């Protein structure tokens, strides 16, 4: 049983899934990097078109240290990949002999990092397809609840993954297990690479502006085609109808700010390497040519570095 759970990183994703699990009866403990006092005082509030769910302060177990939490059955990593240098310190206090590590991080590289640090046998990868924002510490607005996919790192679906999927489903989260985690990660990049990236490159605009501007929609399609061609180099076949699903899904979002754009506008570090750099490097090493992705990656490195410097000097 996965009864005791740690959420490592109480941003948008961690707060949302942690609260849903807690509301379903799980014993959830949140490691919080910022907003600790606010979450202790107010608990957690989830808002969507259907109304409001609250996890009161008495049921919101938040901590400023993983040492305070201690060993758990599942450690769910929801930190941004830009904070991955902290994992070697944050995770050991949470690990018992059978502790499972579930990473819900973006891009490529987190599965391999966790396997190298703590053993591949502990690692399960997950992908969260969700449109939501953190409006304040512990306050999450959900535009599209979406779904989660999970898979073993380098292995087919196991019984423990099925139990994790069942845990999320009991919490009201649409969730499924996949045999090929690597392919699932490339599928998510089909959306993340163009839309997270172009909203920044186009000057800090929402996704509806990308779709409403022929130049940027054309660029999004070019990027998607490159991602699909790169995935094919690794044996991952992504069907054409999946592409149109991404555009239809994005149109339904309306004026949405992806997480990378939110970080950029706030002057925070953007996950440039995990989402754009690492996929580009892997694809190029496999012999793929990706001129649109290479240009976008170069642009994002320049823009995010400039923004970070402005924030530091202000």
Image (spheres, helix red, strand yellow):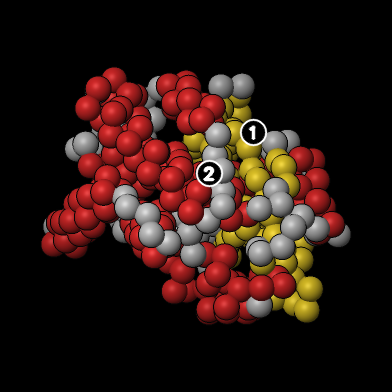
Left or right placement of residue 171 versus residue 118 in this view: right
For residue 4, what is the image quadrant? bottom right
Front disc: 2 or 1: 2
Tag 1: Cα neighbours inside 10 Å, few (<14), some, or many (≥20)?
A: some
Answer whether residue 30 is visible to the viewer in this image.
no
SS at badge 1: strand
Query: Residue 209, image x and y in percent?
Result: 28, 25
User: Can see residue 197?
Assistant: yes
What residue appears at the point 50 percent right and 48 percent down from the top-left corner?
232
In the picture as drawn, the residue positioned furthest to the front comes out as 287
Q: Which quadrant holds the C terminus?
A: bottom left
Mark 2 or mark 1, earlier in chain: 1
Which residue is rendered at x = 43% and y = 50% of the image? Answer: 230
Q: Which mark is residue 53?
A: 1
Left or right: residue 298 versus residue 272 is left
Where residue 78 sits, quadrant-wise, is bottom right
């Amino acid at each position: 049983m996965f009864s005791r759970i740690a959420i490592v990183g109480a941003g948008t994703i961690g707060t949302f899934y942690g609260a849903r699990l807690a509301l379903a009866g799980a014993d959830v403990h949140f490691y919080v990097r910022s907003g600790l006092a606010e979450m202790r005082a107010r608990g957690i509030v989830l808002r969507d078109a259907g109304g409001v769910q609250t996890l009161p302060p008495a049921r919101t177990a938040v901590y400023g240290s993983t040492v305070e939490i201690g060993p758990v059955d599942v450690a769910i990593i929801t930190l941004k990949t830009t904070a991955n240098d902290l994992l070697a310190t944050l995770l050991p206090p949470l690990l018992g002999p059978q502790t499972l590590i579930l990473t819900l991080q973006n891009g490529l590289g987190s599965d391999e990092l966790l396997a190298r640090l703590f053993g591949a046998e502990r690692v399960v990868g997950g992908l969260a397809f969700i449109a939501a924002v953190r409006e304040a510490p512990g306050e999450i607005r959900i535009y599209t609840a979406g779904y989660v996919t999970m898979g073993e790192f380098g292995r087919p679906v196991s019984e423990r993954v099925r139990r994790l999927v069942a845990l999320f489903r009991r919490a009201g989260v649409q969730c499924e297990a996949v045999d090929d985690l690597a392919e699932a990660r490339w599928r998510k990049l089909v959306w993340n690479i163009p839309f997270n990236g172009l909203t920044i490159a186009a000057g800090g605009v929402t996704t509806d502006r990308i779709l409403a501007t022929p130049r940027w929609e054309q660029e999004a399609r070019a990027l998607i085609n490159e991602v699909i061609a790169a995935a094919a180099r690794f044996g991952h076949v992504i069907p054409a109808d999946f592409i149109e699903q991404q555009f239809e899904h994005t149109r339904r979002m309306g004026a949405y700010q992806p997480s990378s754009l939110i970080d950029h506008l706030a002057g925070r570090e953007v996950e440039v390497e995990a989402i754009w750099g690492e996929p580009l490097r892997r694809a190029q090493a496999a012999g793929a040519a990706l001129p649109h992705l290479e240009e976008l990656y170069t642009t994002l490195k320049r823009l995010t570095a400039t923004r970070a410097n402005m924030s530091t000097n202000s």
